[in-house]
Amino acid sequence: MQAQPSPTVEHGFPLLLSPLRVGPLELRNRVVMGSLHTRLENEPDGIRKLAVFYEARARGGVGLVITGSVSPNREGRVEEDGSVLDSEAVVEEHRPVVAAVHGAGARIVMQVLHAGIYAKHPQLVGPSSRRSPINRRVPRALTTEEVEATVDDFVRCAELAARAGYDGVEVMGSEGYLVNQFLAPRTNDRTDDWGGSLDNRMRFPTTIVRRIRKRMGAGFLVVYRISAIDLVEGGMTADEIDTLARAVEAAGADVLNTGIGWHESTVPTIATMVPRGAFAFASARLKRAVRIPVIASNRINTPDVAEAILQAGSADLVSMARPLLADPDFVAKAAAGRGSEINTCIGCNQACLDHIFSGRLATCLVNPKACHETEFDDRPVPDRRRIAVVGSGPAGLACAATAAERGHEVTLFEADRAIGGQLNMARRIPGKVQEFGELIRYFGQQVSASGVIVRAGVRADWQMLVAGGFDRVVVATGIRPRTPDIDGIDHPKAVSYLDVILGRVRVGARVAIIGTGGIGHDVAELLTAGHAGDASVDEFLAGWGVDTAISTGGGLGQPAAAVPVREVTLFQRTTQTPKARLGLSTGWIHRTQLARRGVRTVMGCTYTRIDDEGLHYTVDGKPEVCPADHVVICAGQDPDQTLVAPLRAAGMDVDLIGGARIASELDAKRAIDEGTRLAYSF
Ligand code: NAP
Ligand code: SF4
């Protein structure tokens, strides 16, 4: 079926917000909430919390929800306690979620995912016994009979999903999971009917789809998530993907969802530095191959980007998962012309994917209420109090806006003329400019809409705060950059990261950076990027060697050669890999990018002095010198608690949050979470 735009056009996003018939379903708009693993189901009272979580997104206007992954058998579960739907006994657990979503006017399909060789448990199986580079366990190859039985398990799982009330299923055929593993020569060296030729490799997905369609009939939505570009060697070519897309359509799929890259791919696909809509070209390719509707995905985080993709004809629907974690009311706000109030997902992965990968409950850096919906009481406070918040970094902004929304009278003091604190540093780093700008935009809007009295350009002292008659003072004054005790630290070559990021010094061609934390890496990025803003889509794709024509299997070409802008070396005293200080799922991106630009890291060093030559240090007692025009100090932070003692001495109630409370390991995630939670405690 060719997707037909409907003629509802009295708002700003005419295509995005218009209904669409997909298979047997009439969707109220083109916004699909993509599959997202939260781990809520593993929490005490998890089913109810999951229902509340999805209901909030459905009430917020999403057209179609695709659940987190559910496996068709035990071998296929993603991790030891991963969800499985393989018996009647489990059906009941799904009903509250389905009822909640239906009750809020949206449709819901369950994603059926077999992890194959990615499974994090000992019973893992695959098309072949080839180990994945991102899993230490070696899979057992399925026998021919077991492949047949696995197909049956997919069909049975779909049948059970229908019994739980789901409107359909999504067969997960991308991201390098089992279905994808059958398709790619990289992971399938079988010699039976399920391996070898393209027809044989396609047999697994097409048989699954055909049999689900046959068993469930026309009234059940079948979504197939296709890997539109594998981004690994030994993946599929464009011709093979097109052939697969048509075969899946012929087998009975109602709609194709776009998957981009395998988990083991060394091309970033969803991180902040990936430009918005960078992979729309892959959905556009699929649309040319099939007649059924196509869903675009990856780094689509605003209604404008979504609408532009639809207007360009690159897709019929748009999938957003993390943006709906960030703001459950995304669609409702877009529809009401309140787009500037949307809390935008910045692609950091810090609280969603990184939490999941480390076995924790997912949440969201910009929205700490995500997956914690049942912990917050949004009723207005009975006693309106006068609260001063000092410092408008992420902690102070979150606290001020939330407290004011709850009904308190809040005054926010900021010494600078602009709000944002450290966020204003982040927004100067190439790859972060646009998204950190959004974070400041969102909080600025919240602060103003909630009636916070903003006193920017005012450095609050304790006397002023005591005289102000506040009931309590929240100290969110942030951090002070640490000045390490190194001989020559006052030398003109030694500069603070603040001087560099704020452009207060003209940095020379050879640079030594002391400190390999997030800020050290950010400074290295800034000094070697060769451009001030974020990369364009074309620059990003060329820089990472993405072959948009997918002329060779996997679509990996040669990354464009980096033009060295400066000679930069990072230094640290400890010997632990610097990756440990960076984001779990994003640190490798920064490290790879910097390595391509020739940035070196020296570990285990003792600093001797900074002088006209540069940075002197020893490693294993051996003296070395790094000739440098500048030595940038990124040696961590100390909390700025100047106000606390005098305020307490004056009898004020004082709370400390963010970097002012603990500076080490500080990031915007903890700052926003602390600010928000404190505001709920008043
Ligand atoms: P950090 O991550 O704590 O790193 C501080 C660095 O300074 C370390 O490399 C440390 O290495 C070194 N150091 C500490 N004390 C020192 C001393 N006395 N003398 C010399 N070197 C010293 O702090 P940060 O880089 O300032 O980042 C602050 C926070 O901002 C981070 O926790 C991070 O979450 C967040 N952030 C993250 C990112 C990102 O992930 N992209 C970007 C920006 C900021 P040794 O002790 O080994 O020498
Ligand atoms: Fe987006 Fe970061 Fe929130 Fe994840 S944690 S949903 S990437 S803003």
Image (cartoon, rainbow, N blue to C red):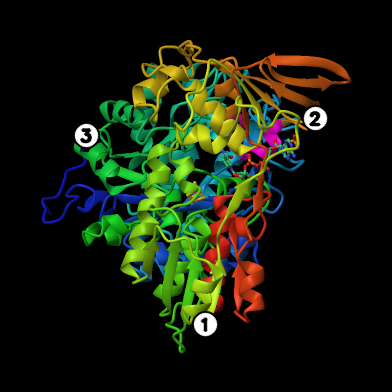
Is residue 588 part of the magenta span, yes or no? yes
Residue at mark 2? 575
Residue projecting furthest to the right: 621
Query: Is the CB atom of the residue marked by disc 1 within 8 angstroms of ligand 1's nearest atom?
Result: no
**Which is more foreground, mark 1 or mark 2?**
1
Q: Amino acid at mark 1?
A: Asp
Residue at 47% in and 83% down: 385
Question: Residue 313, which numbered label?
Answer: 3
Q: Magenta segment, which residues?
A: 578-589
| Disc 3, SS | loop
Residue at 26% in and 41% down: 316
Q: Amino acid at mark 3?
A: Gly
Q: Position of residue 184 (x, y in %)?
A: 54, 22
Q: Position of residue 399 (x, y in %)?
A: 49, 67
Q: Name the one closer to the observer, 568 or 646.
A: 646
Q: Amino acid at mark 2?
A: Thr
Q: Quadrant of the N terminus?
A: top left
Residue at 68% in and 14% down: 613
Q: Name the one closer to the observer, 479 or 433.
A: 479
Return the disc, 3 or 2, that comes first in the chain's sequence. 3
Is residue 204 part of the magenta span, yes or no? no
Q: Name the one closer to the observer, 381 or 397.
A: 397
Residue projecting furthest to the bottom: 382
Question: Residue 246, which numbered label?
Answer: none
Mark 2 neighbour density, 10 Å: few (under 14) some (14–19) many (20 or more): few
Q: Position of residue 588 (x, y in %)?
A: 61, 30
Residue at mark 1? 471
The image quarter containing residue 185 is top right
Query: Mark 1 touching mark 2, by CB under 8 A?
Result: no
Return the disc, 3 or 1, that comes first in the chain's sequence. 3
